[in-house]
Amino acid sequence: MNPAPSTASRLTITRPDDWHLHLRDGAAMAAVLPCSAAQFARAIVMPNLREPITSTAAALAYRQRILAALPEDRPSFTPLMTLYLTDQLAPDEIRRAADAGIVAAKLYPAGATTHSSAGVTDIRKLYPVLEAMQQLGMLLLVHGEVTDPDVDIFDREAVFIDRVMAPLRRDFPALKVVFEHITTREAAQYVAQAGAHTAATITAHHLLYNRNALFMGGLRPHHYCLPVLKRESHRLALVEAATSGSDRFFLGTDSAPHAAALKEASVCGAGCFTALSALELYAEAFEAAGALDKLEGFASHHGPAFYSLPRNPGTLTLERTDWTLPETLPFGDALLKPLRAGQVIGWRVQAG
Ligand code: DOR
Ligand code: ZN
């Protein structure tokens, strides 16, 4: 049973981490980085840049660019770097990456999402790499959708479980796998029963919205992300998983900034920019489920446990205050529209 909704006016939790974040590069990165650094101590930085991060050297150089762009008031924000898996990546590169402190590698099925054309065409080609990762304790992060055009877009995650995830688990039982940004009841159920080496991240937008949000009074490009929003029964299953207290589910915003002009175009890129109000959105979702008491585990404890990292020393406080999100933010030489632009949200992260 869920407890009665809390009426407290503030909530203090261990400083959280974002286990799935797109920061981009250059001026765009410098524009969005302060949002994440204001709320999170660490973030898993996704490697799907226009020129994907496929080597240790590229990951370390990217890390340096992020550190150099950190705002002065948040010098201790820690980007945790990832490698982008391709058909060509050699197991030796995995060893170099592990030695250099790169914690994970990301599997994008080729063509599944933004900047994924260099991704993996057949997971069997990766087996020597996965063997090395399993040995070295490097995590595998998975965009879990098949790309088969014959599979309906709303079914691509569920089909991925049968075609890819289950065989992967069978063949690499000791590999730590994060099923990223899960969106379906099938994925939540799969992860809940898959054993201690499988976990999942869940975004705030998949906890708050179902697919009707894509079509409210007209096509809504700022609600378009991948995996695409699903029907209400799936949203409810995600809320149940996130608020269950199970340490196999944790926070990953998948905050994915795209210039507003490119979102509002005849072909709209996939991604919701949520980093500006990430914890506020999660707090809203957990409060609506009567489970604010489960937010700290999800946001701050379960991720470090799965990644075998310490919890953060500091705290973050959310206050119950209405505020209006800006319509736009600067984004290099473009503009960025946050999810909920111009709308009111009922929680606010306290500065500090
Ligand atoms: O919505 C998404 N946006 N999903 C992804 O998998 C990638 C991301 C991006 O990089 O824009
Ligand atoms: Zn992502």
Image (cartoon, rainbow, N blue to C red):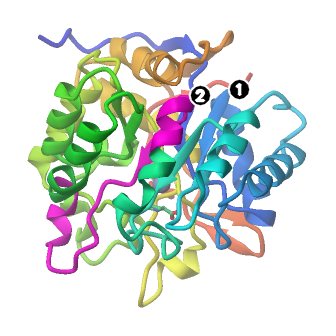
Report the Cα–Cα distance between label 1 and label 2.
Answer: 6 Å
140 falls in the magenta region: yes
User: Would you say 24 lies left or right of 274 here?
Assistant: right
Amino acid type, mark 1: Ala
Q: Which residue is mark 1?
A: 351
Residue 304 pos. (x, y %): 53, 20
Q: Residue at x 31, y 20 (%)?
A: 196
**Vertical placement of 306 versus 133: above or below?**
above
Q: Are marks 1 and 2 in contact (CB under 8 Å)?
A: yes
Residue nearest the observer in this picture, 129 or 199:
129
Residue that label 2 marks: 349
- Name above or below for residue 18 compared with residue 327: above
* Residue at 52 percent of width and 39 percent of height: 133
Queried whether the magenta region covers residue 344, the answer comes back as no
Task: State which quarter of the image contains the N terminus.
Answer: top left
Q: Is residue 262 above or below residue 34?
A: below
Image coords of residue 229 (percent x, y):
26, 58
Identified at 51% across, 19% down, the residue is: 300
- Number of labels in the image equals 2
Mark 1 Cβ and ligand 2 under 8 Å apart: no
Specify the quadrant of the image occupied by residue 5.
Answer: top left
Residue at the location (61% across, 56% down)? 47
Count residues near mark 1 (Cα–Cα under 10 Å), then give few for <14, some for 14-19, many for 20+: few
Q: Secondary structure at mark 1?
A: loop
Is disc 2 placed on a helix, strand or loop?
Answer: strand
